[in-house]
Image (cartoon, rainbow, N blue to C red):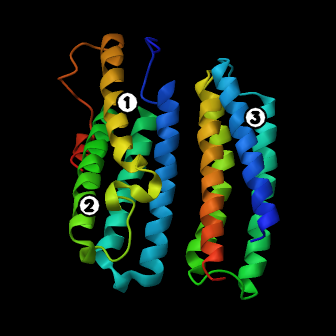
Protein backbone atom coordinates (compact mmCIF):
# COMPACT_ATOMS: atom_id res chain seq x y z
CA UNK A 1 0.00 0.00 0.00
CA UNK A 2 1.36 3.40 -0.95
CA UNK A 3 0.38 6.55 0.83
CA UNK A 4 0.19 8.57 -2.38
CA UNK A 5 -2.30 6.20 -4.01
CA UNK A 6 -4.33 5.92 -0.79
CA UNK A 7 -4.51 9.71 -0.55
CA UNK A 8 -5.65 9.99 -4.18
CA UNK A 9 -8.37 7.37 -3.58
CA UNK A 10 -9.60 9.14 -0.45
CA UNK A 11 -9.71 12.52 -2.25
CA UNK A 12 -11.54 11.08 -5.28
CA UNK A 13 -14.07 9.20 -3.14
CA UNK A 14 -14.77 12.27 -1.00
CA UNK A 15 -15.18 14.45 -4.11
CA UNK A 16 -17.56 11.88 -5.62
CA UNK A 17 -19.48 11.76 -2.31
CA UNK A 18 -19.72 15.56 -2.23
CA UNK A 19 -20.91 15.71 -5.85
CA UNK A 20 -23.50 13.00 -5.20
CA UNK A 21 -24.68 14.75 -2.07
CA UNK A 22 -25.14 17.91 -4.10
CA UNK A 23 -27.16 15.94 -6.70
CA UNK A 24 -29.36 14.49 -3.99
CA UNK A 25 -29.80 17.95 -2.50
CA UNK A 26 -30.99 19.29 -5.88
CA UNK A 27 -33.36 16.30 -6.21
CA UNK A 28 -31.56 14.83 -9.25
CA UNK A 29 -31.38 11.15 -10.14
CA UNK A 30 -28.13 9.38 -10.93
CA UNK A 31 -26.50 10.30 -14.23
CA UNK A 32 -23.40 9.82 -16.35
CA UNK A 33 -21.10 11.99 -14.15
CA UNK A 34 -21.80 9.74 -11.15
CA UNK A 35 -20.97 6.65 -13.19
CA UNK A 36 -17.75 8.23 -14.47
CA UNK A 37 -16.71 9.11 -10.92
CA UNK A 38 -17.41 5.55 -9.75
CA UNK A 39 -15.51 4.20 -12.76
CA UNK A 40 -12.44 6.30 -11.91
CA UNK A 41 -12.70 5.17 -8.30
CA UNK A 42 -12.92 1.51 -9.35
CA UNK A 43 -9.84 1.82 -11.60
CA UNK A 44 -7.91 3.35 -8.70
CA UNK A 45 -9.05 0.56 -6.38
CA UNK A 46 -8.02 -2.13 -8.88
CA UNK A 47 -4.61 -0.45 -9.16
CA UNK A 48 -4.37 -0.48 -5.40
CA UNK A 49 -5.33 -4.18 -5.27
CA UNK A 50 -2.57 -5.04 -7.76
CA UNK A 51 0.04 -2.94 -5.95
CA UNK A 52 -1.10 -4.31 -2.60
CA UNK A 53 -0.91 -7.93 -3.75
CA UNK A 54 2.58 -7.43 -5.17
CA UNK A 55 3.77 -5.85 -1.93
CA UNK A 56 2.14 -8.43 0.36
CA UNK A 57 3.51 -11.35 -1.68
CA UNK A 58 6.90 -9.63 -1.55
CA UNK A 59 6.86 -9.89 2.26
CA UNK A 60 5.76 -6.34 3.02
CA UNK A 61 2.64 -5.38 4.85
CA UNK A 62 0.86 -6.14 8.11
CA UNK A 63 1.08 -9.30 10.21
CA UNK A 64 -2.60 -10.04 9.75
CA UNK A 65 -2.29 -10.05 5.98
CA UNK A 66 -5.54 -12.03 5.61
CA UNK A 67 -7.53 -9.09 6.98
CA UNK A 68 -5.68 -6.67 4.73
CA UNK A 69 -6.21 -8.81 1.64
CA UNK A 70 -9.87 -9.12 2.63
CA UNK A 71 -10.19 -5.34 2.59
CA UNK A 72 -8.22 -5.15 -0.65
CA UNK A 73 -10.74 -7.41 -2.40
CA UNK A 74 -13.98 -6.46 -0.61
CA UNK A 75 -13.54 -2.78 -1.42
CA UNK A 76 -13.58 -3.62 -5.15
CA UNK A 77 -17.24 -4.66 -4.83
CA UNK A 78 -18.48 -1.35 -3.51
CA UNK A 79 -18.39 1.02 -6.55
CA UNK A 80 -20.08 -1.45 -8.96
CA UNK A 81 -22.66 -2.46 -6.36
CA UNK A 82 -23.36 1.20 -5.57
CA UNK A 83 -23.70 2.03 -9.26
CA UNK A 84 -26.14 -0.81 -9.90
CA UNK A 85 -28.25 -0.19 -6.82
CA UNK A 86 -28.26 3.59 -7.34
CA UNK A 87 -29.29 3.31 -11.00
CA UNK A 88 -32.38 1.30 -10.02
CA UNK A 89 -33.65 4.28 -8.06
CA UNK A 90 -34.78 7.15 -10.27
CA UNK A 91 -34.90 9.71 -7.50
CA UNK A 92 -32.58 11.70 -5.25
CA UNK A 93 -31.90 8.53 -3.28
CA UNK A 94 -29.92 7.12 -6.22
CA UNK A 95 -27.06 9.60 -5.67
CA UNK A 96 -27.70 9.07 -1.97
CA UNK A 97 -26.57 5.47 -2.38
CA UNK A 98 -23.39 6.76 -4.06
CA UNK A 99 -22.72 9.01 -1.05
CA UNK A 100 -22.90 5.94 1.21
CA UNK A 101 -20.68 3.89 -1.13
CA UNK A 102 -18.01 6.59 -1.49
CA UNK A 103 -17.87 7.32 2.24
CA UNK A 104 -17.53 3.59 2.87
CA UNK A 105 -14.58 3.43 0.44
CA UNK A 106 -12.88 6.39 2.17
CA UNK A 107 -13.37 4.85 5.63
CA UNK A 108 -12.08 1.47 4.44
CA UNK A 109 -8.94 3.06 2.96
CA UNK A 110 -8.21 4.79 6.27
CA UNK A 111 -8.71 1.47 8.06
CA UNK A 112 -6.37 -0.25 5.58
CA UNK A 113 -3.69 2.38 6.21
CA UNK A 114 -3.99 1.71 9.94
CA UNK A 115 -3.61 -2.03 9.32
CA UNK A 116 -0.63 -1.42 7.06
CA UNK A 117 1.14 0.91 9.44
CA UNK A 118 0.61 -1.44 12.36
CA UNK A 119 3.74 -3.33 11.31
CA UNK A 120 5.92 -0.28 10.79
CA UNK A 121 5.94 0.67 14.44
CA UNK B 1 -41.40 12.17 3.48
CA UNK B 2 -42.64 10.42 0.35
CA UNK B 3 -46.19 9.15 0.55
CA UNK B 4 -46.13 7.36 -2.76
CA UNK B 5 -48.64 4.53 -2.99
CA UNK B 6 -46.08 2.07 -4.41
CA UNK B 7 -43.66 2.67 -1.56
CA UNK B 8 -41.94 -0.56 -0.67
CA UNK B 9 -39.07 -1.26 1.66
CA UNK B 10 -36.48 -0.88 -1.11
CA UNK B 11 -37.46 2.38 -2.81
CA UNK B 12 -36.82 5.97 -1.79
CA UNK B 13 -34.99 6.23 1.55
CA UNK B 14 -35.20 2.44 1.74
CA UNK B 15 -32.62 2.37 -1.05
CA UNK B 16 -30.13 3.92 1.38
CA UNK B 17 -31.11 1.56 4.17
CA UNK B 18 -30.52 -1.49 1.96
CA UNK B 19 -27.16 -0.02 0.87
CA UNK B 20 -26.01 0.41 4.47
CA UNK B 21 -27.27 -3.07 5.37
CA UNK B 22 -25.38 -4.51 2.40
CA UNK B 23 -22.21 -2.76 3.60
CA UNK B 24 -22.57 -4.31 7.03
CA UNK B 25 -23.31 -7.71 5.53
CA UNK B 26 -20.03 -7.36 3.64
CA UNK B 27 -18.11 -6.05 6.66
CA UNK B 28 -19.42 -8.67 9.10
CA UNK B 29 -19.13 -11.46 6.54
CA UNK B 30 -15.55 -10.63 5.62
CA UNK B 31 -14.61 -10.23 9.26
CA UNK B 32 -16.16 -13.59 10.21
CA UNK B 33 -14.55 -15.27 7.21
CA UNK B 34 -11.07 -14.05 8.12
CA UNK B 35 -11.51 -14.77 11.84
CA UNK B 36 -12.88 -18.29 11.39
CA UNK B 37 -10.53 -19.10 8.53
CA UNK B 38 -7.29 -18.02 10.21
CA UNK B 39 -7.62 -18.16 14.00
CA UNK B 40 -10.87 -19.82 15.01
CA UNK B 41 -9.44 -21.51 18.15
CA UNK B 42 -8.39 -18.19 19.69
CA UNK B 43 -11.91 -16.94 20.41
CA UNK B 44 -14.56 -19.29 19.01
CA UNK B 45 -17.50 -17.58 20.72
CA UNK B 46 -16.63 -14.12 19.39
CA UNK B 47 -15.98 -15.47 15.91
CA UNK B 48 -19.19 -17.47 15.79
CA UNK B 49 -21.02 -14.32 16.88
CA UNK B 50 -19.41 -12.49 13.98
CA UNK B 51 -20.73 -15.18 11.66
CA UNK B 52 -24.22 -14.99 13.18
CA UNK B 53 -24.18 -11.21 12.79
CA UNK B 54 -23.14 -11.61 9.17
CA UNK B 55 -26.00 -14.02 8.47
CA UNK B 56 -28.50 -11.63 10.08
CA UNK B 57 -27.22 -8.69 8.03
CA UNK B 58 -27.44 -10.72 4.83
CA UNK B 59 -31.00 -11.80 5.72
CA UNK B 60 -32.05 -8.22 6.48
CA UNK B 61 -30.42 -6.90 3.28
CA UNK B 62 -32.13 -9.44 1.04
CA UNK B 63 -35.48 -9.18 2.80
CA UNK B 64 -35.52 -5.36 2.68
CA UNK B 65 -34.43 -5.43 -0.97
CA UNK B 66 -37.22 -7.84 -1.96
CA UNK B 67 -39.93 -6.14 0.11
CA UNK B 68 -42.73 -8.69 -0.32
CA UNK B 69 -45.05 -9.71 2.47
CA UNK B 70 -42.97 -12.68 3.62
CA UNK B 71 -39.78 -10.66 3.14
CA UNK B 72 -41.20 -7.98 5.37
CA UNK B 73 -41.68 -10.51 8.16
CA UNK B 74 -38.17 -11.86 7.69
CA UNK B 75 -36.87 -8.28 7.80
CA UNK B 76 -38.75 -7.53 11.04
CA UNK B 77 -37.37 -10.71 12.59
CA UNK B 78 -33.83 -9.97 11.38
CA UNK B 79 -33.87 -6.36 12.63
CA UNK B 80 -35.32 -7.45 15.99
CA UNK B 81 -32.71 -10.17 16.50
CA UNK B 82 -30.06 -7.68 15.40
CA UNK B 83 -31.21 -5.09 17.94
CA UNK B 84 -31.29 -7.74 20.66
CA UNK B 85 -27.87 -8.98 19.59
CA UNK B 86 -26.20 -5.59 19.62
CA UNK B 87 -27.69 -4.78 23.04
CA UNK B 88 -26.76 -8.15 24.63
CA UNK B 89 -23.30 -8.45 23.05
CA UNK B 90 -22.62 -4.75 23.65
CA UNK B 91 -23.48 -5.07 27.34
CA UNK B 92 -21.60 -8.35 27.82
CA UNK B 93 -18.50 -7.10 26.01
CA UNK B 94 -18.28 -4.16 28.39
CA UNK B 95 -19.25 -6.10 31.54
CA UNK B 96 -17.08 -9.16 30.93
CA UNK B 97 -14.30 -8.23 28.52
CA UNK B 98 -12.54 -11.58 29.02
CA UNK B 99 -15.45 -13.39 27.38
CA UNK B 100 -14.75 -11.41 24.19
CA UNK B 101 -10.98 -11.46 23.65
CA UNK B 102 -11.46 -10.30 20.06
CA UNK B 103 -13.96 -7.81 18.73
CA UNK B 104 -17.17 -8.55 16.88
CA UNK B 105 -19.29 -6.08 14.92
CA UNK B 106 -21.52 -5.71 17.99
CA UNK B 107 -18.82 -5.29 20.66
CA UNK B 108 -19.19 -2.10 22.70
CA UNK B 109 -22.56 -1.46 20.98
CA UNK B 110 -20.84 -1.23 17.59
CA UNK B 111 -18.22 1.25 18.79
CA UNK B 112 -15.75 0.12 16.12
CA UNK B 113 -18.26 1.01 13.43
CA UNK B 114 -19.34 4.44 14.65
CA UNK B 115 -22.28 2.94 16.58
CA UNK B 116 -24.04 2.38 13.27
CA UNK B 117 -24.83 -1.26 14.27
CA UNK B 118 -26.82 0.12 17.23
CA UNK B 119 -28.79 2.66 15.18
CA UNK B 120 -29.33 0.52 12.08
CA UNK B 121 -31.89 -2.00 13.45
CA UNK B 122 -33.91 0.84 15.01
CA UNK B 123 -33.98 2.72 11.71
CA UNK B 124 -34.85 -0.55 9.97
CA UNK B 125 -37.79 -1.30 12.25
CA UNK B 126 -39.10 2.28 12.01
CA UNK B 127 -38.83 2.12 8.22
CA UNK B 128 -40.65 -1.25 8.11
CA UNK B 129 -43.39 0.16 10.30
CA UNK B 130 -43.77 3.32 8.18
CA UNK B 131 -43.87 1.48 4.87
CA UNK B 132 -46.29 -1.14 6.20
CA UNK B 133 -48.95 1.55 6.58
CA UNK B 134 -48.75 2.73 2.96
CA UNK B 135 -48.29 -0.81 1.62
CA UNK B 136 -51.27 -2.00 3.62
CA UNK B 137 -53.51 0.54 1.91
CA UNK B 138 -52.11 -0.26 -1.52
CA UNK B 139 -52.60 -4.01 -1.22
CA UNK B 140 -55.25 -5.99 0.62
CA UNK B 141 -56.45 -4.74 4.02
CA UNK B 142 -56.54 -8.32 5.34
CA UNK B 143 -52.87 -8.31 6.25
CA UNK B 144 -53.48 -10.68 9.16
CA UNK B 145 -54.37 -13.54 6.84
CA UNK B 146 -51.04 -14.50 5.37
CA UNK B 147 -51.15 -17.29 2.82
CA UNK B 148 -47.54 -17.00 1.71
CA UNK B 149 -46.13 -20.52 1.29
CA UNK B 150 -42.75 -20.33 2.97
CA UNK B 151 -43.48 -18.59 6.26
CA UNK B 152 -41.34 -21.22 7.98
CA UNK B 153 -38.28 -19.18 7.13
CA UNK B 154 -39.47 -16.29 9.32
CA UNK B 155 -38.78 -18.21 12.51
CA UNK B 156 -35.14 -17.16 12.44
List the single residue furthest toward the left: B144
Few, some or many residues within 10 Å of mark 2 (<14, 14–19, 20+): many
- The residue labelled by disc 3 is A34
Taking the image as shown, residue B10 lies to the left or right of residue A69, namely: left
- The residue labelled by disc 2 is B89
The answer to whether marks 2 and 3 sit on the same chain is: no
Q: CA distance from mark 1 to mark 2?
A: 30 Å
Is there any visible trace of residue A74 in the rendered image?
A: no
Q: Secondary structure at mark 2?
A: helix
Q: CA distance from mark 2 to mark 3?
A: 39 Å
Question: Residue A30: horizontal and vertical position, in percent?
Answer: 70, 27
Q: Which of the two discs, 1 and 2, sits closer to the camera?
A: 2
Question: Residue A112: horizontal and vertical position, in percent?
Answer: 63, 66
Tell me the number on the disc at residue B68: 1
Question: Residue A89: horizontal and vertical position, in percent?
Answer: 60, 26
Tell me the number on the disc at residue B59: none
Q: CA distance from mark 3 to mark 1?
A: 30 Å
Q: Secondary structure at mark 3?
A: helix
A66 or A87: nearer the eye?
Answer: A66
Is there any visible trace of residue A117 in the rendered image?
A: yes
Q: Chain of mark 3?
A: A
Q: With respect to residue A105, does A85 lie above or below? A: above
Amino acid sequence: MTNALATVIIVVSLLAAAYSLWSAWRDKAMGVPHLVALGVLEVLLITQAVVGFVKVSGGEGPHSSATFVGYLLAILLIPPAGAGWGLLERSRYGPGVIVVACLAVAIMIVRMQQLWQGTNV
Amino acid sequence: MSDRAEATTRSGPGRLLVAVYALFALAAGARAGVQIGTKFSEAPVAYLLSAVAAVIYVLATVALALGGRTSRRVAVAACSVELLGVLVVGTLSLADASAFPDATVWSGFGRGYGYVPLVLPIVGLVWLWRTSRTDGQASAPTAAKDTAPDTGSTSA
